Image (tube, rainbow, N blue to C red):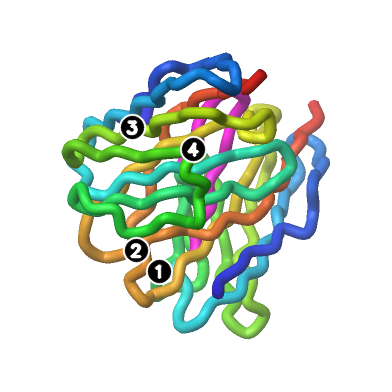
Amino acid sequence: ETGVTQTPRHLVMGMTNKKSLKCEQHLGHNAMYWYKQSAKKPLELMFVYNFKEQTENNSVPSRFSPECPNSSHLFLHLHTLQPEDSALYLCASSPGGAGDNEQFFGPGTRLTVL
Amino acid sequence: AQSVAQPEDQVNVAEGNPLTVKCTYSVSGNPYLFWYVQYPNRGLQFLLKYITGDNLVKGSYGFEAEFNKSQTSFHLKKPSALVSDSALYFCAVRDDTGRRALTFGSGTRLQVQP
């Protein structure tokens, strides 16, 4: 395993539910990311955090709300989602500093919105 | 803006034969280029990267990639394919301006036949 864990691995929720995805990295990294992977589409960057500060929000709808309480943990809070939000949500981390470092990915959370 | 093109949705190759997975990119400034592999129900795993220096980069599991600046390409290669190499392969690019976000291609499914 890569040292990045995500829970839950699978989630089914209704459009009126509120749920949260959790990501934890054990690599001592300072940057964390949320990506959305939909079938037959490129990975879509959602959010970037660097030293707990959000540095990028890729025009993500407000029904997705990230939280980064410290450099090891990243959450994605979900509310009033749509069926088209069903996808694999991937968390990644990388060292702080220079941008030439590779990202380490978690196994993802498979989200189904009914 | 930066972009990545993986022109082949799927590549089929017989075990023992050489394989090539194609990637071209567009970026302002100098590119940082990455290859990742994704096995079923898993996150992305880092294979190799090009930052600077030698145009031929060697990575994990016997894979290598050749950076060609004039053709803006970064094709992934392996001299002798294994059935276990069958997976989804992603090329990604970042520019050297300090922005952390990677831009991914749409992925190429590699199928190695016994």
Pick whichever, B22 or B60, lies toward us. Answer: B22
Task: Please say if the residues under marks 2 and 3 sit with CB atoms less than 8 Å apart.
Answer: no
Residue A59 % position (x, y): 50, 56
Quadrant location of the N terminus of chain A in the rendered image: top left
Task: Please say if the residues under marks 1 and 2 sit with CB atoms less than 8 Å apart.
Answer: yes
SS for tag 2? loop
Counting residues from the start of the chain, the first of labels 3 and 4 encountered is: 4
Residue B60 % position (x, y): 47, 44
Task: Please say if the residues under marks 3 and 1 sit with CB atoms less than 8 Å apart.
Answer: no
Asked if B61 appears above or below B49 in the picture, the reply is above
Please name the amino acid that badge 1 sits on. Ile
Task: Please say if the residues under marks 2 and 4 sit with CB atoms less than 8 Å apart.
Answer: no
Q: Residues within 10 Å of mark 4 (few under 14, many from 20)?
A: some
Please provide the residue range marked out in magenta. B33-45
Q: CA distance from mark 3 to mark 4?
A: 13 Å
Q: Are marks 2 and 3 on the same chain?
A: yes
Residue B68 appears left or right of B102:
right
Q: In the rendered image, which residue does mark 2 sit on?
A: A100
Q: Chain of mark 3?
A: A
Instruction: For marks 3 and 1, give the one nearer the viewer.
Output: 3
SS for tag 4? loop
Reply yes or no: does residue B39 show up in magenta: yes
Q: Are marks 2 and 4 on the same chain?
A: yes
Q: Residues within 10 Å of mark 1 (few under 14, many from 20)?
A: some
Please name the amino acid that badge 3 sits on. Phe
Instruction: For marks 3 and 4, give the one nearer the viewer.
Output: 4
Counting residues from the start of the chain, the first of labels 2 and 3 encountered is: 3
Q: In the rendered image, which residue does mark 3 sit on?
A: A75
